[in-house]
Image (cartoon, helix red, strand yellow):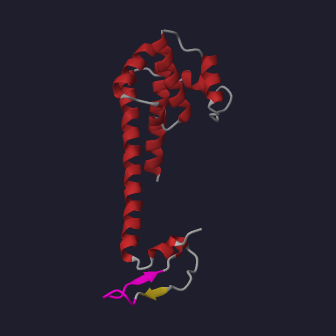
Amino acid sequence: MDCTNETTNAQRLAERRLLAAAWAKPSECARVCGSLDLRYMDFADRLVGIVVGYIRQSADAGTAPDLDEAERILSERAVPRSPGELYAILQEPTAGESIPDLALAVQQSADERTSELCRSLTREAFRAWSHTFNCRDCIRCSQAKPSPPRLRIAAPRARKAWRLQYERSNAIG
């Protein structure tokens, strides 16, 4: 558990340092994030992801990023934050770390989160698939209600008798 928290804190710190470095060099941030295809969804911290996206847009437009404009965008998107949090992030030191290294760290953590999500979804899908094949009465079992008795009708005209089973899921209306 402590290892996971340390990893999460390191990832969050890398994202914040990337934001601080990107604010100082928006054109390099736009170039690096464009080549790595980093989007705001790749960031664990929503505030950082949205502001890095804003920095990329301002660099593409050829303008310098503005703190008031960044705060306005965060307010528009209803990002929860404390007063002055963005300014505090931008004041964090980034000595000795380059934007490409920080962006690669962010991309790696995004890939790890995606892989973990895929593993989790695969486990859930396998559980559902396994249940479907092992449960004799899966439709009623998934509805979690007591089912009515089955209605069986035999067709005397057919050479082999067939049976129609009434299932609540097949009922009309």
On the question of residue 156 being in view, the answer is yes
* 56 relative to 158 in the view: left or right: right
Q: Main secondary structure of the magenta part?
A: loop
* 162 relative to 24 in the view: left or right: left
Q: Residue at x 63, y 23 (%)?
A: 71
Q: Quadrant of residue 96?
A: top left
Question: Which residue is the extreme one toward the left?
Answer: 159
Q: Residue 159 colored magenta? A: yes
Question: Which residue is the extreme one toward the front?
Answer: 157
User: In the picture shown, does residue 37 fall above or below 11?
Assistant: above
Q: Where does residue 112 sit, x and y in percent of width and height? A: 37, 44
On the question of residue 23 being in view, the answer is no
Q: Residue at x 37, y 57 (%)?
A: 122
User: In the picture shown, does residue 147 fall above or below 49?
Assistant: below
| Quadrant containing the C terminus in the rendered view | bottom right
Q: Residue 120 colored magenta? A: no
Q: Quadrant of residue 143?
A: bottom right
Q: Where does residue 111 sit, x and y in percent of width and height? A: 37, 40
In this rendering, the count of numbered labels is: 0
Q: Residue at x 45, y 74 (%)?
A: 138
Magenta residues, start to end: 156-165
Q: Where does residue 13 sit, x and y in percent of width and height? A: 48, 33
